[in-house]
Amino acid sequence: MRRPAPGPRLFAHDRALGARFVAGADEAGRGCLAGPLVAAAVLFDHQRLHRAEIRALAQLNDSKAQTPAARAELYPVILRVASRVSIVSRCARGIDARGLHVTNLSALREALANVACDGAICLSDGFALGETPYEHRAVIRGDATSAAIAAASVLAKETRDRYMRRADELNPGWGFAHHVGYASPEHRRAIERLGVTPLHRLSFDSVAYQQLSLG
């Protein structure tokens, strides 16, 4: 038996919150050795969402549960259907200077602030974002619960993956197009063989860096 599409369930969750506007934020690349951290936020206007648009996003789900082809297909649909979208990037040097957690919260706050509007319910995936000019709620496993967060998850992941594929062309040999900066065996072997690039986060205490002199 075919499993029901996740999108309608996620939109039903957001509609049940009782607000016309629901915004969600999520990030991609938090656990990477190389490349930016990308945060995204999406605002849906539920008074203007029609059945056809929800059907077009029927396969919307947590980006980690999507194939690359599915994310690429959903990306332009989200941009078309959403009322507002924001994508924020933080580079490796900024992460090294400010720390990963501080950088992550800052990027998520900025992305969500860019799409928030009066009367909107603002949601973040996993944890609260600290003091913000808008009220927001943390949703555990939000990218598999809320349509707004899931849409942000797809935008963040697809945007970051596109960046890393371009980085692979400019930095051949590290395999960025395949592991997109995560600490895969392939990536660790490339670091051992070639060293690091300006895209690598040097503040990470990773086994991949143990053979290098990074001081």
Image (cartoon, helix red, strand yellow):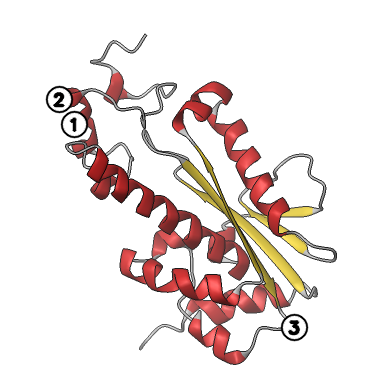
Q: CA distance from mark 2 to mark 1?
A: 5 Å
Q: Amino acid at mark 2?
A: Arg
Q: Position of residue 128 (x, y in %)?
A: 70, 45
Q: What residue is shown with label 1?
A: 190
Front in this rendered view, residue 111 or 3: 111
Labelled disc at residue 23: none
User: Taking 191 as reference, is 129 above or below it?
Assistant: below
Quadrant that contains the N terminus: bottom left
Task: Look at 79% across and 65% down and name the residue there.
Answer: 120
Cβ–Cβ under 8 Å for marks 2 and 1: yes
Q: What residue is shown with label 2?
A: 193
- 74 displayed left or right of 124: left
Q: CA distance from mark 1 to mark 3?
A: 50 Å
**Dot 1 or dot 3, earlier in sequence:** 3
Task: Look at 75% across and 71% down and name the residue there.
Answer: 21
Q: Amino acid at mark 3?
A: Gln
**Could you say whether the residue bearing mark 2 is in a helix, strand or loop?**
helix
Q: CA distance from mark 2 to mark 3?
A: 55 Å
